[in-house]
Amino acid sequence: MKSLRHAVALLVPALLALGAAAMFLVFAIARKVVTPGVRVTDTEILAVDTGAQTIELTRTPDTELPGRYGLFTTGTTGYVKLGAVLSADKKRVRRKLLTQVETGAKLDRAASFSGWYYSTPSELHLPWESLLIGSPAGPCPAWLFPAESTTWVIQVHGRGGARSECLRAVPVFHGMGLPNLVVSYRNDGEAPRVRGGSYALGASEWRDVDAAIGYALRHGATRVLLMGWSMGGAIALQTAVSSAHREKIAGLILESPVVDWRTVLRFQARESGIRAPFPALAMNALSSPLTARLSGSGETIPFDKLDMVARADELTAPILVLHSDDDGFVPADASHALAEARPDLVTMPRFTVARHTKLWNYDQMSWTGAITDWTSANGFSASD
């Protein structure tokens, strides 16, 4: 009996410590989901040849992709544009520099490979203006690229991103005569910070996009197309089913979209080596009023409401989904499920290889063709 009491005395603290460690992990996972983070470094600069204007990076599924991309780093230059892959082996990739890097420039080794490409509106050589859109969160910065049509395109960037992410699509729509309004939203680093600065994964951010729709309607638009990138896709979908202006939303274009957060978060947890039941527990923590704040969220996250496959019957406007089957970050499963649930509304041409939000970079011609074909088929043009 004495030995049993001794065993229990040792076991109870061990179980309590294990439970505390598990709870800490659950809250850490949840906090990572809703906290806007710093840009993740996912490659390293191995060498720069300023004479040949080439750069060598560690080889990853992203850095080996053909096409044009961007690279965020620090040092003399904070952002450079990259061109074609010139050579590669098992460990490294050599690419052409499209941004002039001068002799003596210092680039830090840690870098982030990106599909953004354009970083400022002036690089597009199109007329544009900066403005502020009044939203429930406060004044949200936006860029307006004017054109003659009364059908406006409103673009919404993704999680951890900024408006520059959307610039790749502006020339496509401008070429069709469609004005572009590229917007920001609460807690994205440009728009106002509210509720502790955390993301609501689309559950609140849609209100800022709804304010942008109101701005467009007050300034000549008769209908709008929403284009959402990654989490911006989730925001666009929430806007489509929640907006007071929903009858003015003529269509949606979703680039590498989050259609169901549970699918995405389970996938990302597996990729990080985190196994069940921790992802489910983290989502439960975020969706409970008792634990949401402990998880770093300024409000509860309604994962059922954010599941647009389950809510597919509420959608009314035509949708173009652009999503690579080899996304690698936001799996295309929920996009395919949405297309199967609403074949009457959803057009989803097949893309592979391109990775997350890099379809324009990898295959600009097919990506542009998919948008222009869909836009024409649905009668969204300057003449309508």
Image (tube, grey):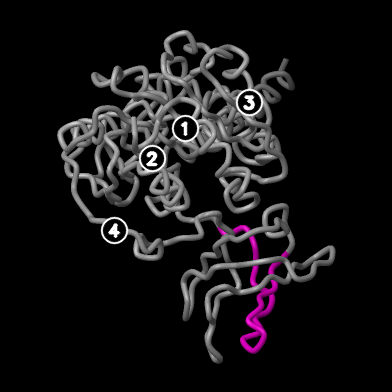
Give me the residue at 35% from left, 20% from top. Answer: 289
Give the class, few, some or many, for how many residues have Cα within 10 Å of label 4's Cα (few <14, many ≥20): few
Q: Which residues are magenta?
A: 41-58
How far across and how far down the image is residue 30, in percent?
48, 33
Which residue matches tag 3? 9
As helix, strand or loop, the secondary structure at mark 3 comes to helix
Amino acid type, residue under disc 4 in the picture: Pro
Q: CA–CA distance between discs 4 and 2?
A: 20 Å
Asked if the magenta segment contains residue 45, the reply would be yes
Mark 4 or mark 2, which has the lower sequence index?
4
Mark 1 or mark 2, which has the lower sequence index?
2
Q: CA–CA distance between discs 4 and 3?
A: 74 Å
- Residue 349 vs 198, above or below: the answer is above
Quadrant location of residue 337? top right
- Residue 170 vs 260, above or below: the answer is below
Of tags 4 and 2, the one toward the viewer is 4
Which residue matches tag 2? 156
Residue 127 is marked as 4
